[in-house]
Image (spheres, rainbow, N blue to C red):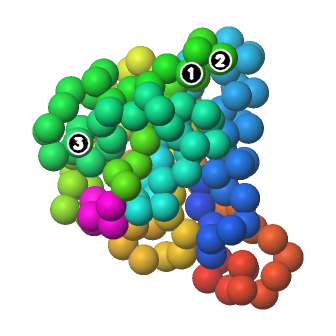
Amino acid sequence: MSEAIVFTSGKGGVGKTTVISNIGVELSQLDKKVIMLDTDMGLRNLDLVMGIEDKVNYNILDILNRSCRIRQAIIRNKKYPNLYVIPAAPSMDTLCSYEARFKILIEELKASFDYCLIDSPAGIDSGFWFSVSPADRAIVVTTPHVSAIHDE
């Protein structure tokens, strides 16, 4: 049974993207087919952390606004054959108007992948609600600082 897991935090800079990328790599090495989605618009880092930034032609916003097909935006990580990434858009465009389409996208991806790992924006604004809406569970990444746990 496939699972969508969102990784979230109360503030930026706590290591959320590092955690999701490491868990994605480990799951892929356990022969699980994993796709990681970056929904942190304007602060896209997942493709950078995974070393595939030069492979980005399309992003999650392109899928949701139907500028491309899903498979056109998926980037396979050659170092980890079971690991795939859908990068975030480089602009701060809001995804919130696409929440229904995002839920459908996650359901479609769950049919092909064992795990859909969602890298959400920090905080609890509309981007957070968008990212957590299709998730089966959440992992909250934090540090022992007051500013990191205040919103959580």
Secondary element at image label 3: helix
Q: Looking at the picture, does residue 126 appear above or below residue 118?
A: below
**N-terminal label among 3 and 1:** 3
Q: Which residue is mark 1?
A: 77
**Residue shown at the point (18%, 31%) measured from the top left:** 68
Tell me the kind of residue under disc 3: Asp
**Residue shown at the point (43%, 53%) measured from the top left:** 39
In the picture provided, is 138 more to the left or to the right than 19?
Answer: left
Mark 3 and mark 2 in contact? Answer it, CB < 8 Å.
no
Q: In the rendered structure, which segment of residues is drawn in magenta?
A: 91-95
Q: Which residue is mark 3?
A: 62
Residue 135 inside the magenta-drawn segment: no
| Residue 65 percent location from the top left of the image | 15, 46
Q: Please state the total of marks drawn on the protein image.
A: 3
In the picture provided, is 151 more to the left or to the right than 70?
Answer: right
Chief secondary structure of the magenta portion? loop
**Residue shown at the point (71%, 37%) measured from the top left:** 23
Q: Residues within 10 Å of mark 1 (few under 14, many from 20)?
A: some
- Residue 103 seen in the figure: no
Which residue lies most toward the front here?
Answer: 54
Q: Which residue is mark 2?
A: 80
Mark 2 and mark 1 in contact? Answer it, CB < 8 Å.
yes
